[in-house]
Amino acid sequence: MIPFSGNVRVFVACGVTDMRRGMNGLALQVQQALGRDPHCGDLYIFAGRRRDTVKLLWHDGIGMSLYTRRLEAGRFTWPSRVEGTITISASQLAYLLDGIDWSAPKRNAKPFRPQLAG
């Protein structure tokens, strides 16, 4: 997992991104298309047309990092909006990176509640 603090905001770039872009091209996209500062410590996620690969762009205050994640089978769940960004939580990011539908995770079992002896 990426070692970022809990106060980092996570933005999903809606639509399709050219996965041939590197760190500088994605930082430029954050500035021009999304109207945000790529050096402010936020994390940005981009997906290509096939949605089997995502790229994460993050500046930690020291330098810029670019992470790539590819699923061997299946596709990442991606927003249906054509442009702009949406904000997700750190737990939703973990779901997204595992290939789970982060927009509507389902609980499989009821939470365990201990019975008090009486």
Image (cartoon, rainbow, N blue to C red):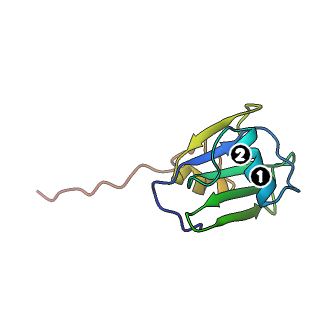
Which quarter of the picture shows residue 64? bottom right
- Residue 111 makes an appearance in the image: yes
To which residue does mark 2 refer?
30
Q: Secondary structure at mark 1?
A: helix
Residue at screen point 52% across, 48% down: 89
Query: 115 or 85, which is in the foreground?
Result: 85
Q: Is residue 107 left or right of residue 34?
A: left
Question: On the rendered image, what quadrant is the N terminus found in?
Answer: bottom right
Q: Position of residue 46 (x, y in %)?
A: 74, 49
- Residue 74 makes an appearance in the image: no
Name the mark on residue 115: none
Q: Position of residue 53 (x, y in %)?
A: 80, 56
Which quarter of the picture shows residue 86? top right
Q: Secondary structure at mark 2?
A: helix
Q: Amino acid at mark 1?
A: Leu
Q: Amino acid at mark 2?
A: Val
In the displayed structure, would residue 110 be above or below residue 6? Answer: above
Q: Answer yes or no: do the residues labelled 1 and 2 have beta carbons within 8 Å?
A: yes
Query: 20 or 112, which is in the foreground?
Result: 20
Residue at screen point 82% across, 46% down: 17
Residue at screen point 55% across, 68% down: 3
To which residue does mark 1 refer?
26
Which quarter of the picture shows residue 84? top right
Q: Position of residue 29 (x, y in %)?
A: 76, 45
